[in-house]
Image (cartoon, helix red, strand yellow):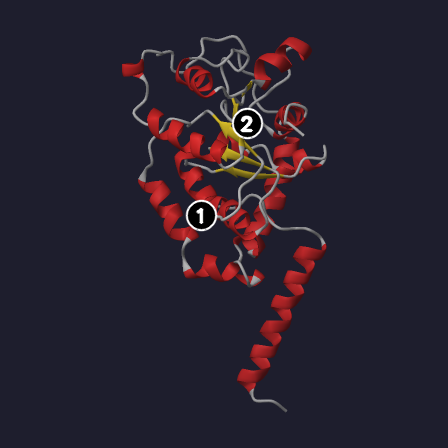
Amino acid sequence: MPPVPTRIFVLTALIVAGWLGFVFWTDSRADLAESNVQANLIRITRYLREPAPDVVLVGSSVGGRLLPGYFESHGVKLLNLGLDGSRPLFGFEVLKASNSRPRVILLETSALFQPLTPNDATLREAMNSPTATMGRVLPFFRAEVRPLSVLYNNVKSLRDSASGGRAANPNAANSGDVLLAADELPETYSDIVSVIKTFKEQGTEVLILDIPRGEGWAEPSRGAVRALALELNLPILEPGPAIFAEQGDVLRFSDGLHLNAPSAKIVSEWITKKIPR
């Protein structure tokens, strides 16, 4: 009979292999997680590990509610870099960390001009950690297969699907930036312009995406977002005004800001029809 340490090692290996087999066979990998860092790490490492997807959404938690499965059901392969507590400036860092580029970037506007914060430094450290690096080769180290994350993902998905969400006034005063003068634009404006120009030069198409978020969700974008679109000749996708005009007041929000699951599916379906094929 093998010594006890060997038996423990073999048993552990069998349990790990069985768990990984179950996760990948049932496609139970987590998209959501029990903490912001783990949820973001799932998305970041998936982007860095897998071949460049056709479309990448870059943004904050507002964009993070549009899960890849909502797009895949309509024939669009999308990877979501809508990162909780983060902003596109850090999402650009993730894109640059890969040698390949997506065909289309959907640039979500809710935190577009916000500067980097210590939270982004934490994510940067996590995505470059030894565990994340090993996870690119060894599935066991990937955040998306952690038992707690898989359990949380399934429970939250069921809860979100059953949630009625909250209504929000679609035509309330838009809280977006209304400043257009060059000397009044956000400090990060020139940085955003520079990065987008680089991506366009590399052959990636960039579309601005104004995702509905609470009060005023049917109002068109304005201010620095509109100025950016005009300067770089970028299309603006505005599902809120379009959906409201076509279907009336149909969108609801889980916490007054983020789309609930049924509304996120409606918005995702609208977006898939506007992505260049």
Q: Nearer the viewer, residue 106 or 7?
A: 106
Q: Secondary structure at mark 1?
A: loop
Classify 37 as above or below 198: below
Relative to 199, 72 lies left or right: right
Residue 54 in picture, x, y percent from top left = 62, 38
Q: Which residue is mark 1?
A: 97
In the displayed structure, 140 sits above or below 111; it is below
Residue sitting at x 61%, y 67%: 16
Q: Residue at x 43, y 30 (%)?
A: 197
Q: Residue at x 37, y 26 (%)?
A: 113
Residue placed farthest to the bottom in the image?
1
Quadrant of the drawing holding the N terminus: bottom right
Q: Distance from label 2 to label 1 (Cα)? A: 33 Å
- Please say if 7 is above or below 200: below
The reply to whether callout 2 and callout 1 are in contact (CB within 8 Å) is no
Which circle marks residue 44 in the picture?
none
| Residue 131 location, quadrant | bottom left
Q: Indicate the position of residue 82 as horizontal and vertical percent values.
A: 50, 36
Q: Amino acid at mark 2?
A: Ser
Tell me the amino acid under the disc marked 1: Ala
- For disc 1, the neighbor class at 10 Å (few under 14, some 14 to 19, many from 20) is few
Helix, strand or loop at disc 2? Answer: loop
Q: Which residue is mark 2?
A: 254
- Whether residue 87 is visible to the viewer of this picture, yes or no, is no
Q: In front here: 58 or 13?
A: 58
Relative image position of residue 10 (x, y in whole percent): 61, 78
Rendered location of residue 270, percent (x, y): 66, 23
